[in-house]
Each structure stands twice: as structure tokens, then as C-alpha cells.
Amino acid sequence: MDNSISALYKDLRKKYGRPEGQWKLWCKRPKTLTEREEVVVGAILTQNTNWKNVEYALANLKKEKLCSLSKINGINKLRLSRLVKPSGFYNQKTDYLKRTAKFIDEECGGLRKLGKKPLVELKKELTALKGLGRETADSIILYALDKPVFVIDAYTRRLAKKLNLTDNLSYLSLQNLFESNLPRSYKLYQDFHALIVINEKQGR
């Protein structure tokens, strides 16, 4: 066990407390189905953009009462692309949202049924969807489905490099580093990852 990992979490928790901002919803426990679906949508929209732009896109969807996977599955692509335009790369993200919503809504029978699948199966099926790489898929698995998988993103990688936690900064290597040195808890993983992002965004 690498005590520096657990010490890092304790330091961040002491510095920031419970995650706030975007993370207040993402780390909320328990979440309603509506909140879980918002996390799925947000996880896709946040690719290659900042969270403020995602908030504008989410606000557009909520205003039209379309921030649900079944509604996104049924909406016209042109209308959806206009609503999510603030998030950037909106044509791509429209395709990703439609494909993910259709898979969850039609093939899985909804988010609750998707969440009953084993973790290995979830990873395989979600990353098979175009537009869902490891980071986005793991974000959905962790924050929307409450499954213990540690999300690795640019902020996590930057902090690991800054603190010399490891020489191998690949996705799977870093994920294994965190997961093998922490209790297997989705609650801990949610808060820890969120606090890393908060810390790195503040440049500390």
C-alpha cells in the first residue's frame, strides 16, 4: 500500500471539505434518476470544454424539459445540436448523446437496469460506444451509477506527475495506482477525484 495516496486524499479533504460547484451534484448521495441522467449528459458535454459552457447547454436542455435520456433519444438531431451548441463540438456531441441515449434507453431498458450490470461489462459496453473513451465511460460509471472505478483525467495525471507518484502516467497504470491503494468505495472515489480537479483548477 502506498500511504502517500491516502495521505493526499486526507490533505485535500482537509483543505476543501466536501466537493462544491459542479461536484455537489456529481458527489451527491443518493441521487435521483433525473440527477443520474444529468450526470450522464454532463459527462459527454464536458469533453474538450470548460464546465461553464456545459452549464449553458444543460440549462438549454432543462428549459425545454429535454434533459433526460429518453427525451434525448427521441429528439430531432438538429434541435438537439442547437441546444447543446454552447458546449462546443456540438455536432459531434449531439451524435455521442444520441448514440448513448439510444443504447441506455432502448438496449438496456434505462439507467437503472444498466447499473445492475457487472463493472467489467459496463466498461466494455460503454467504451464500445463512439465518443465514450475510458475517461467519459468511467465518469458515467462512477458518478451516475455509483460503481467503484477511479476516473483518470488530465488533472489527475498532472497532480500525479507533480507529486512524483509514479513514472507511468498511462490511464490504466494510474487507475490501478489509486484503486490498489484505497478502500474500494465509490463514495471515496467520487470525492477524491472531484477534489483533485478542484485543487488543480486552482493551480495548487
Image (cartoon, rainbow, N blue to C red):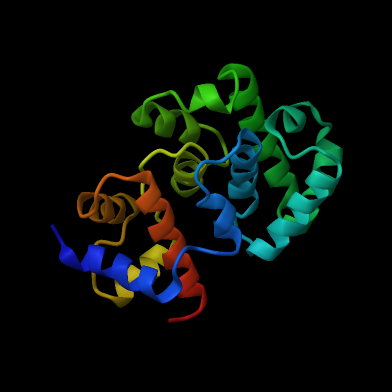
For the point 15% across and 62% down, which residue is it? 2
In the rendered image, residue 82, in percent from the top left (x then y), is placed at 85, 47
From this viewpoint, is residue 76 visible?
Answer: yes
The quarter of the image holding the N terminus is bottom left
Left or right: residue 126 versus residue 101 is left
Q: Taking 122 as reference, is 150 above or below it?
A: below
Q: Where does residue 11 sit, x and y in percent of width and height?
A: 32, 73
Residue 73: % across, % down: 73, 28
Residue at image point 48% right, 41% down: 137
Q: How many marks?
A: 0
**In this view, which residue lies farthest toward the left?**
1
- Residue at 72%, 41% (x, y): give it: 94
The C terminus lies in quadrant = bottom left
Front position in the image: 190 or 166: 190
Considering every residue shown, the one lying at the far bottom of the view is: 204
Horizontal side of 81 relative to 173 (left or right) equals: right
Q: Is residue 167 visible?
A: no
In this view, the residue in front, 133 or 182, is: 182
As displayed, is residue 119 above or below residue 192?
above
Residue displayed at 65% across by 30% down: 101
Residue 86 appears in which quarter of the rendering? bottom right
Question: Could you tell me residue 17's position as x and y percent?
Answer: 44, 68
Return the residue nearer the eye: 88 or 58. 58
Q: In this view, does 4 lie above or below 54?
A: below
